[in-house]
Amino acid sequence: MALTNTQEREQTEFSNRPQPIDGKMGATIIGPANPTREAENPDTLVPPRADHGTMANLRWSFADSHMHLSEGGWGRQTTARELPIATEVAGVNMRLTAGGVREMHWHKAAEWAYMLKGMARITAIDQDGHTFQDDVGEGDLWYFPAGIPHSIQGLEGDGCEFLLVFDDGNFSEEETFLLSDWLAHTPREVLAKNFGVPQSAFDGIPQKDLWIFQAPVPGPLASDRVAGAGPVPNSFSHRMLAQTPIRMNGGTVRITDSSLFKASKTIAAALVEVEPGGMRELHWHTNVDEWQYYISGQARMTVFASQNNARTFNFQAGDVGAVPFPMAHYIENIGASTLRFLEIFRSDHFADVSLAQWLAFTPHELVRAHLNIDESVLAKIPPRKTPVVAG
Ligand code: MN
Ligand code: MN
């Protein structure tokens, strides 16, 4: 019997779909399917044969996070509510238009940020009345310690988009202490008494919180300077992308922890670039969980969890990855362009152990007794002190 056009089209679509088939194992999906998502996660659909066992989910995409829209921008978060394994760190992806303000506020967690696109003006004061104002661009960081009040405003052009990282997986961007929210819940006579002015001075204050709102684009930074008790002793901003990268065959790494960015006492980070075909080598971390944010490219990460358990996850721009302490892992660039991602740690320092270094720096006789490998494998490993991208 001849196929109708619809049947033919369905059959073509079906044959183009990724299928859970690996040699003689598996079979086609004949029930409901989501081919787009299955294509995005080829190593979930057809796991590498070395994968085994049951593991917690280690991946979330900001594309699946609830969007909070406001006049002047938006925000969406990936917290322990979205990715339950990630209890140490939460992330917020935020956009501000030119002039758009994330209003003056503070919160219980410390805030670390990486500017993804555009420019912003950030302000803060510390507990001693020291002030901080800076303009930050792509690849710049900021860090506001817990409780320190601050603001962010998009600048000329198209404003900005950035990643915020908090040193608490249960942080919520909806539970911050907002200037407008506080004053809306403070009687006018108290405000009048506090500032020594008539109550009428506060007739214009907003009746509900602003969170993000549209304001005029500010003038040059120099004209926005407020002296206060002088500048904060350790700058709240840092030019991460301007750091000279550590170069390896397969890519580059920039590490920023409190040894370089002194203010950042609870968040350490690495910006990793892996060329096509290269990989972030087999390693693990000796201090805390790892939280990742993928900036560009396509990746595959396999995590070894001990007890026969290993699982592979796929990542692309806007995805978040998690690696519980001290699970071993590696990340391959499986795309045609440079893979760029951030490794984030709730720590004052970056710390990892490389498999290659471990083997090279252990008596070779002992290593060979374990693995039955040739001395030539060990001889090829260069001594090193920094994380390695293999190419
Ligand atoms: Mn904040
Ligand atoms: Mn790692």
Image: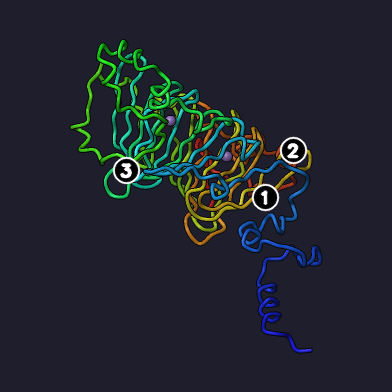
How would you rate the neighbour count of disc 2 (Cα within 10 Å): few for under 14, some for 14-19, many for 20 or more?
A: few
Quadrant assignment for ligand 1: top left
Q: Are marks 3 and 2 in contact (CB under 8 Å)?
A: no
Identify which amino acid the numbered label 1 is placed on: Thr
Q: x, y (%) of residue 326? A: 65, 33
Q: Which residue is mark 2?
A: 306
Q: x, y (%) of residue 123? A: 32, 29
* First in sequence: mark 3 vs mark 2: 3
For the question of whether residue 380 can be seen, the reply is: no
For the question of whether residue 375 can be seen, the reply is: yes
* First in sequence: mark 3 vs mark 1: 3
Residue nearer the viewer, 135 or 338: 135
Q: Residue at x 34, y 25 (%)?
A: 124
Q: Which residue is mark 3?
A: 119
Residue 70: quadrant of the picture: top left
Q: Which mark is residue 247?
A: none
**3D distance between C-alphas at marks 3 and 2:** 44 Å
Residue at the far left in the pictured view: 223
Q: Quadrant of the N terminus?
A: bottom right
Q: Which residue is mark 1?
A: 312
Classify mark 1: helix, strand or loop: strand
Residue nearer the viewer, 148 or 4: 4
Residue at the far bottom in the pictured view: 2
